[in-house]
Amino acid sequence: MTIPHLQKNARCADVVAMVEASGGVVIDRAVSSEFMDQLAAQLRPWIEKTPTGIDDFEGRRTRRTGGLIARSPKCRELLMNPLVLGSASQILGRATSLQVNATQAITIAPGEPAQVIHRDQWAFDMYPFAKDYQVIVNAIWTMPDFTAQNGATRVVPGSHTFEDKLRFTEADTEPAEMARGSVFLYPGTTYHGGGANRSDTNRTGIALSYSASWLRQEENQYLAVPLEIARMLPEELLRLMGYQRGAYALGYVDDLRDPMEFVRPDLAKRGLAR
């Protein structure tokens, strides 16, 4: 089984079908190279300030730059991309709503070995979710082209249906090679890992993940995005960040107040009714 590719004019139903069949799909050139130029300019000073990882999983030659909603308007556009967000909403459709789980610019420097193969949903304390219930969807956007040489994400195709806690080596995987501005979309059950960078240049990917809104977010959006910035963001993005109730009553403030009241009082709703 190989990693399938679709064009940016695909329908959400096509994307979801590919994910369900193969455990992931590449959407080729979903945004332009010029878009990525602007995104790179916005992130460059933040990436340069980011320390490298402290262990083999984080990557001792890898920088993981977060807080992208606050730091990059272009990343906000990626998060709200209609095809990616619409597909993620369908994949996570058994949950009442979804939220931003984490935002990272992952920069793998030359000489970094391959990351251990894992499932993203293991972040939730290795909880054994039902095999047919997805709780997280990840989108990895390419800043440069992703190649087997420069550390393209390594994937075990079809592994979203496998048993949990399996172990794989790099030899068991296939690189998600794709052109600049493309995105690889996959659920939290797909086994994958960052590839080894055997090139002489950095490989940066923008990892934007979505999760069911009843789970704790990996990246705390309320602290990562200062209120003065949050108050300038559109309603749809604020709700995606978590300024809404998850499920029926999760996330209200004191006397059943809507969390939206703290950023946009004009949009707040009373009580628990949605």
Image (cartoon, rainbow, N blue to C red):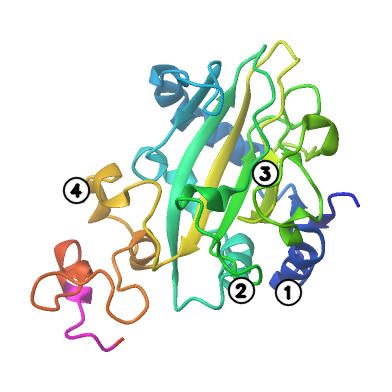
Earlier in the chain: of badge 1 and badge 4, it is 1
Say left or right for 67 vs 160.
Answer: left
Q: What is the three-letter code of the residue carrying label 1?
A: Ala
> What secondary structure is marked by label 1?
helix
Nearer to me, 51 or 214: 214
Instruction: Residue 257 in the image: state x and y as whole percent.
Output: 14, 75
Q: Cβ–Cβ below 8 Å for labels 4 and 2? A: no
Residue at screen point 81% across, 56% down: 158
**Magenta-tinted stretch:** 266-273
What is the distance, in whole Å, between disc 3 and disc 4 at their CAs? 30 Å
- Say whether residue 181 is visible: no
Q: Cβ–Cβ below 8 Å for labels 3 and 2? A: no
Q: Cβ–Cβ below 8 Å for labels 2 and 1? A: yes
Q: Check disc 3: other Cα within 10 Å, few if <14, some if 14-19, many if 20+.
A: few
> What secondary structure is marked by label 3?
loop
Q: Check disc 2: other Cα within 10 Å, few if <14, some if 14-19, many if 20+.
A: some
Task: Identify the disc placed on residue 189.
Answer: none
Our reading of the magenta stretch's main secondary structure is: loop
Instruction: Residue 132 in the image: state x and y as whole percent.
Output: 65, 72
Instruction: Residue 126 in the image: state x and y as whole percent.
Output: 51, 51
Q: What is the three-letter code of the residue carrying label 2?
A: Gln
Residue identified by numbered label 3: 32
Residue at screen point 32% across, 82% down: 248
Residue identified by numbered label 1: 13
What is the distance, in whole Å, between disc 1 and disc 3 at their CAs? 23 Å
Nearer to me, 172 or 1: 172
Q: Nearer the viewer, mark 3 or mark 4?
A: 4
Nearer to me, 230 or 140: 140
Is residue 272 covered in magenta? yes
Earlier in the chain: of badge 2 and badge 1, it is 1
Residue identified by numbered label 4: 228
